[in-house]
Amino acid sequence: MSRVLLKGVRKSFGDFVALHQLDLEIQEGEFLTLLGPSGCGKTTTLRLIAGFIEPMEGKILLGDEDVTQVAPQHREIGMVFQDYALFPHMTIAENIGFGLKERRYPKQDINDRVEELLDLIRLPEVHDRYPAEVSGGQQQRIAVARAVAYPPKVLLMDEPLGALDLKLRETMQIELRRIQQELAITTVYVTHDQTEAMNMSDRIVVMNSGRIEQMGGAEDIYNEPRTRFVADFVGQINLFDANSYEPETGMIKLDGLDQTVHVPVNLAGGGESLSLGVRPEDIGLANSVESSSGMNHLAGVVSGRTFAGNLTRLFVDVGLQKPVILEAKSQSVKSNVGDKVTLTWPVELSKLLSD
């Protein structure tokens, strides 16, 4: 079995607590991404699973085996690093077959496995080249092939696309996901790139300050964030400080504005303070505040406009420190800087968030 289980795992470095009693289960064959800003604990979690560091408390299980005290080389873990770490003096074939050679596999078996993996990563022609003679994207795929040559129980990847340009990174997201699905291998992936996480993952674990803020599928994380941190980190969102929430009516008052808006009724509103969140793509423009029942409205003045091909963003000053951002198809946005507008969005798309 290749299920991974972390039970009450805690890790500190001096006075800094990197992980606070982490509980996490990774299912067999799952592609799970640890997502969060620098210092949130995601790489520490990956290194604990790999065995590079040991927890101060808790257990790490691989299948039914407790591997907390097991050395990295005995865990049957595959690892892909950010810099790929290919051996520059070896050919691509020698790099991929290195682990098998170390385990004294027969030469023909090594050659067969190397050819199989070169076909899998769609690079059969680079067999005799050296790492310096292939591109960054090709090196990345070769590093994956090397990591899975001796089939590991779990594949770990630590921001392997960070050094690639945007276009290549998008292509490699598709390729990595394809390889993982074809191998049906349990994969734990670390990134701070929200788009990367949403494009590739079965489940996303959003981490903050050594704790799990929220976990779930990409749509759940994006559409139903539970905290202000998750809403702000995953995607663009307009956040308003709020108070005086009435669960029975859904009415809530925005700080700094003499105006109330509505959220869906009877939402849980935990935490010491509340925020209202609205995604830019959920906001439209209304002709008047009287139009459309079941909608929220805010009046303002367009203070900025940016064009990004198929999308245009309007920045609207509603009387707060930060403008409200509206995002829509370019052909539908007619307003310009200085225009008075009324922002509108459906009540059901208002997100009530706690700190």
Image (spheres, helix red, strand yellow):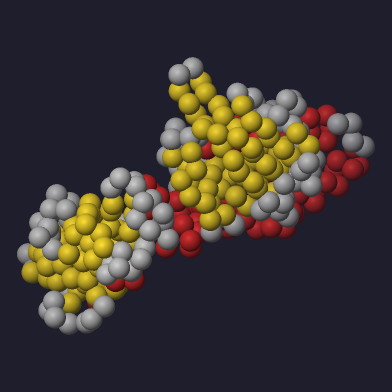
Residue at the top extreme, as displayed: 14
Q: Please indicate whether residue 31 sits to the left or right of residue 190 in the image.
A: right
**Residue at image point 42% right, 61% down:** 224
The one of 133 and 236 positioned closer to us in this rendering: 236
| Total residue callouts | 0
Residue at the front extreme, as displayed: 248
**Residue at image point 83% right, 46% down:** 113
Q: Please indicate whether residue 292 sits to the left or right of residue 217 in the image.
A: left
**Residue at image point 67% right, 32% down:** 59
Q: Where residue 83 sits: x, y (%)? A: 56, 34
**Residue at image point 48% right, 63% down:** 219
Q: Where residue 343 sits: x, y (%)? A: 18, 69
Could you tell me if residue 54 is visible in this image? yes
The one of 133 and 344 positioned closer to us in this rendering: 344
Q: Is residue 339 above or below residue 140?
A: below
Could you tell me if residue 140 is visible in this image? no
Q: Where residue 238 sits: x, y (%)? A: 27, 57
Q: Quadrant of residue 114?
A: top right
The one of 272 and 80 positioned closer to us in this rendering: 272
Q: Quadrant of residue 200?
A: bottom right
Q: Where residue 255 sits: x, y (%)? A: 16, 53
Q: Please indicate whether residue 275 sits to the left or right of residue 43 in the image.
A: left
